[in-house]
Amino acid sequence: MARTMRAMSDSTPSNAALARTAPTWEVELLISGVAVFAMMQLPGWLDSAIFAMEPRLDQGWRLIAVLAYFYAKCAAVILAVTFSLHLLMRAQWIALMGMHSVFPQGMRMDDTRMGPIQRGIEAEQPDDTAEAIERADNRASVTFAIGVTVALIMLAVCLGFCGTLLIANLLSRAFDLQIDTFFIVLWVALAFFGPMLLAVLIDQAFGHRLKSDGWPYRAVSATIRFYTRIGMGRRNNRVVAILLANKGERRAMLTVFGVMMLAVVGVFASFIGMNSRSQLGSYGLFPAADGIGIDAEHYDDERDPARDGASPYVQSMVIRGPYLQLVVPYNPRRNNAAMRGCDVAEDAPERQQAQTRLACLGKLHALQLDGKPVADPDYQIASDPRADRPALLAMIDIRDLPRGRHELVVARQPKEGSKRKKPDPAYDRIVFWN
């Protein structure tokens, strides 16, 4: 350490470059070292949170939750990668500093085993160790600044867009408006940001031709001035503004938007992968089709309540008692639309309203056992104890069933707002052995 300090305080031109070290390197290392482990854990926590929350929400609330999850996870992934890369870059910088302290003479070309052609090419390079140290220092600081700034932009977009969508959804439900709040928010966003975008494009294309006393000039100037005052000017994000001014606008914008797109594509791909039933590997020839396989989420002793959806389940694949205990969790995306049509007398006692809703919900989940309808499943109001969600409970008497394989089919409604090309099966199939 003493040798490093002497090297940094040396007045020779080579060592004077070391004095240009970024003054924030200690704080950068402190933040990266402390926060990198938290950022590594945050994406997994967000995954668990969205899987636990998604089955509880209808289409409107689910859209807000999923968008907030995407933006928040993108920011978390960007920060995790940024802090990890920054630590590696700072480690390289420290290694260069140490090597320069131990070997201040740098590379000794005469002692290096090279041919004359390669030696001549290497000798032509104007680089020295001090310049390499400075570049490594600058590279680490710029990486840290870009990553933190892009993550903050993602969080700002999350708060702005999801907050507006939340307000629109609340107003829609308060006034019982049958409208698609997502597209309304998009139109509002376009109406809000459109004038600023139009004014900037006019300024860049025709600004030098506009006369300062003309109304087009005054209109463009007033528009840009207004948006700048409310926090949309370039100086409001000084990191991006400095990068645009010093690294070239096209290069800097490609870097910023490239980081964003990589994060968005990565998070989207991981979300699709986690929701897909296909497993990673060369399993293309393995037989797979909806309705013929056995899914672990239909058995209470095998399912993962934190990740599996609101699917019906029985106690086990092998039933050893006289009753088959069927639990059908309530799924807002599948059941809300049908339940709104349930004829419930609003002036009836609360208990009678609950019984009417129970009868309507029971009809949505008709049962078949080994191809024969179950006449009266006698659903009870219950809950999924491990996932803490409301559910129906049916105790099905199987004492008269022969030993062996049996099949229970539970009817279900299509998902609200589902536009899948592949048809959504109208039932859940549960295989068990008695």
Image: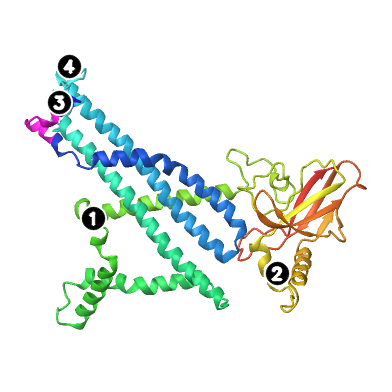
> At which x and y percent is residue 370?
86, 51
Q: Is residue 135 above or below residue 207?
A: above
What label does residue 358 carry, if any?
A: none
Residue situated in front as seen by the camera: 63 or 258? 63
- Residue farthest to the right, as pictured: 400
Q: Judge depth for marks 4 and 2 and give the one in front.
A: 2
The range drawn in magenta is 6-17
Colour scheme employed for the rendering of this structure: rainbow
Residues at discs 3 and 4 in contact (Cβ within 8 Å) = no
> At which x and y percent is residue 87?
32, 36
Residues at discs 1 and 4 in contact (Cβ within 8 Å) = no
Residue linked to disc 1:
244
Spatial CA distance of label 1 from label 4 is 43 Å
10 Å neighbourhood of mark 2: few (<14), some, or many (≥20)? some
Name the element at disc 1: helix
Left or right: 189, with 170 as reference point = left
Residue linked to disc 4:
111
The first of marks 1 and 4 along the sequence is: 4
Question: Dividing the picture into quarters, in which one does residue 376 lie?
Answer: bottom right
Name the element at disc 4: helix
Residue linked to disc 3:
120
Q: Judge depth for marks 1 and 2 and give the one in front.
A: 2
Question: Dividing the picture into quarters, in which one does residue 106 lie?
Answer: top left
The first of marks 4 and 2 along the sequence is: 4
The first of marks 1 and 2 along the sequence is: 1
Residue linked to disc 2:
339
Q: Judge depth for marks 2 and 3 and give the one in front.
A: 2
Spatial CA distance of label 4 from label 2 is 84 Å
Residue situated in front as seen by the camera: 79 or 202? 79
Residues at discs 2 and 3 in contact (Cβ within 8 Å) = no
Q: Is residue 95 above or below residue 157?
A: above
